[in-house]
Image (cartoon, rainbow, N blue to C red):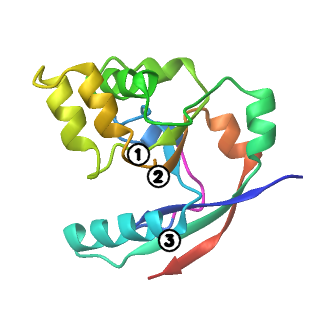
């Protein structure tokens, strides 16, 4: 089995993730978010810890990404491009176009790029300018699992580390 290590940072132990409990109107829709970038998950956990006044926790998993891509309906973004930008905007605007997929992977609309996205959404920046600004950044990877069958079949909990 070809598994990768993924992380979910927060303030709760998540040994049995449930996709339906994710917040609405996020980058890739309502689902369970993980990343293969440990530092990114640690940063997220520490930010949540400060705002909730709870310990920062790093939930660790093994994910059979290869099987998911082979067997499920997936959308994978390799860069901050026009398709990624339109997808993010649609989901953040409540259109929930992610619901047509089981799994979505790609760059995070984080603090490095959110100003560009907001300016473009407000009509204060042209598409070509927004894409030029986005191209200056290498995407941090996030994976959104939208189908509970993927969690149940391809995501294996490996424990939680207090940070």
Q: Which residue is mark 3?
A: 58
Image coordinates of residue 114 in percent, x first then y, are: 24, 42
Q: Local crowd at mark 1 within 10 Å, few (<14), some, or many (≥20)?
A: many
Q: Local crowd at mark 3 within 10 Å, few (<14), some, or many (≥20)?
A: many
Q: In the rendered picture of this protein, how many numbered marks are placed on residues?
A: 3
Quadrant for residue 113, please give it. top left
Q: Looking at this view, is 2 or 82 the one in front?
A: 82
Q: CA distance from mark 2 to mark 1?
A: 6 Å
Image coordinates of residue 97 in percent, x first then y, are: 43, 18
Examine the residues drawn in magenta and state their main secondary structure.
Answer: loop
Q: Which residues are magenta?
A: 14-18
Q: Which residue is mark 2?
A: 140
**In this rendering, which labeled residue sits more in front, label 3 or label 1?**
1
For this orientation, the residue located farthest to the bottom is 163
Q: Looking at this view, is 106 or 143 the one in front?
A: 106
Q: Which residue is mark 1?
A: 108
Q: CA distance from mark 3 to mark 1?
A: 18 Å
Quadrant for residue 96, please give it. top left
Question: Which of the two labelled residues, at mark 2 and mark 1, occupies the earlier sequence position?
Answer: 1
Secondary structure of the residue carrying tag 3 is strand
């Amino acid at each position: 089995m070809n598994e990768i290590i993924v992380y979910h940072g927060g303030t709760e132990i998540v040994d049995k993730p449930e996709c339906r409990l994710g917040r609405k109107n996020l980058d890739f829709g309502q689902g369970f978010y993980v990343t293969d970038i440990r530092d990114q998950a640690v940063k997220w956990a520490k930010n949540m810890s400060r705002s909730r006044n709870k310990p920062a926790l790093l939930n660790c998993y093994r994910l059979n990404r290869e099987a998911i891509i082979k067997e499920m309906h997936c959308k994978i973004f390799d860069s901050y491009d026009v398709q990624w930008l339109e997808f993010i905007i649609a989901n953040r605007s409540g259109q929930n176009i992610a619901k047509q997929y089981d799994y979505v992977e790609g760059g995070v609309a984080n603090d490095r790029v959110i100003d560009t996205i907001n300016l473009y959404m407000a009509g204060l920046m042209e598409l070509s300018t927004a894409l030029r600004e986005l191209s200056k950044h290498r995407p941090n990877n996030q994976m959104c699992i939208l189908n509970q069958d993927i969690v149940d079949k391809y995501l294996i909990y490996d424990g939680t580390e207090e940070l």
